[in-house]
Amino acid sequence: MAESFVGKVALVTGGSSGIGRATALAFAAAGARVVLAARGEELGEGVAREIRERGGEARFVRADMGNGRDVEALFEATLAAYGRLDCACNNAASEEGAFARTADVDEAAFDRTMAVNLKGVWLCMRAELRQMLAQQPAGGAIVNVSSVNGLGGAATGAPYSASKAGVLALTKSAAQEYAREGIRVNALVAGAFRTPMLERVFDRAAGGDAAKVAEVEALYTGYIPLARLGRPEEAAAAVVWLCSDAASYVTGHSMIVDGGMTSPMR
C-alpha cells in the first residue's frame, strides 16, 4: 500500500521541472499539501495547476534559492498557508560553470553555482530546521538532492561537483545534530535523469548540434549498467520514501540512485 502523507505539508524547491516537478506530483498523489518553489513562474504555476487538476492541493511561490530574502519570503508564504512543514526536498540547482577547466571557470559562474546549489540548500535547511523544531508536534524529514558528481569530481565540472559534495556534508552534519529532536535529514545522490537540465548539458556537449545530441547521450548512457537514463519519477519515489514513515530509521544517508553508474567505484 502506498505511503500516506494526508494532512502533511511538503515543500519542494526547484519544483517547476525535472526531479522537482516529479517529486511535487508524487507528494501530492500521496495526499500531501504541496508548496513548490522555483525561479520560473510560468512553469511553476503550471505544475501547481496540474496538481490541483488531479485533485491535489498545491501552491507555487516564485523564489531564487540563492537569494536569502527570497528564501525568507518562501517560508513566510508556506507558514501563512499551512502553519507547519513536515517534509522538504531541497532540489533547486544550477549547472553554471560547467564545461570549463578549473582554471578557466568564470568567477561569477562559480559564485552563482555555489549560491544556488550549496548556500541555497543551507538557507532552506536553516529555515526548515527552525520550523520543524518550533512546531507542534515537532519533527520532520528533509531530503537534499546531490549528484554522483559530488561523490568525487568531474572534469570540466569542478564548481558543480564541489557544490554537490558540500550538500552531502551539510546533510550528514545536520542529521547528527537534529536526530534526537525528531528530524531526519538524508540526501538523494542522483545519477543521470532525463530532465531539462541534463538535456541542456547534452546540447552544450554537442556544441549545439542537434544531430550530435543523440551521440552524446548514447556515449553517456554507455557508462550506466542499466543502459538508460532514469525517469524523474524514479528519483521522486526515492525522495518520497526517504520522507515517509517507512524510512523512520534512516538518517544521515546518501542514497545513490544512478542505474548502477557508480557501482564499479563505490
Image (spheres, rainbow, N blue to C red):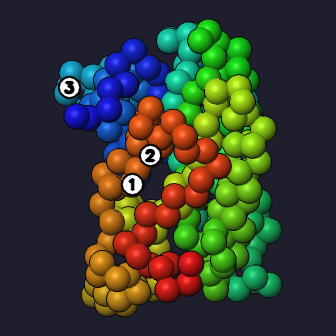
In this view, the residue in front, 162 or 41, is 162
Tell me the residue at 67%/45% (across/down): 121
> Do callouts 1 and 2 mark residues in contact (Cβ within 8 Å)?
yes
- Structural distance between the alpha carbons of marks 2 and 3: 23 Å
In this view, the residue in front, 241 or 144, is 241
In what element is the residue under mark 1?
helix
- Structural distance between the alpha carbons of marks 1 and 2: 6 Å
Mark 3 is on which residue type?
Glu
Q: Nearer the viewer, mark 1 or mark 3?
A: 1
Q: Nearer the viewer, mark 2 or mark 3?
A: 2
Q: What x and y, as percent, mark residue 30?
A: 30, 30
Rendered view: 229 above or below 47: below
Q: Earlier in the sequence, mark 2 or mark 3?
A: 3
Mark 2 is on which residue type?
Val
Image-based side of 122 in relation to 196, left or right: right
Q: Quadrant of residue 212?
A: bottom left
Numbered mark located on residue 235 in the image: 1
Mark 1 is on which residue type?
Ala
* Residue position marked by numbered label 2 in the rendering: 239
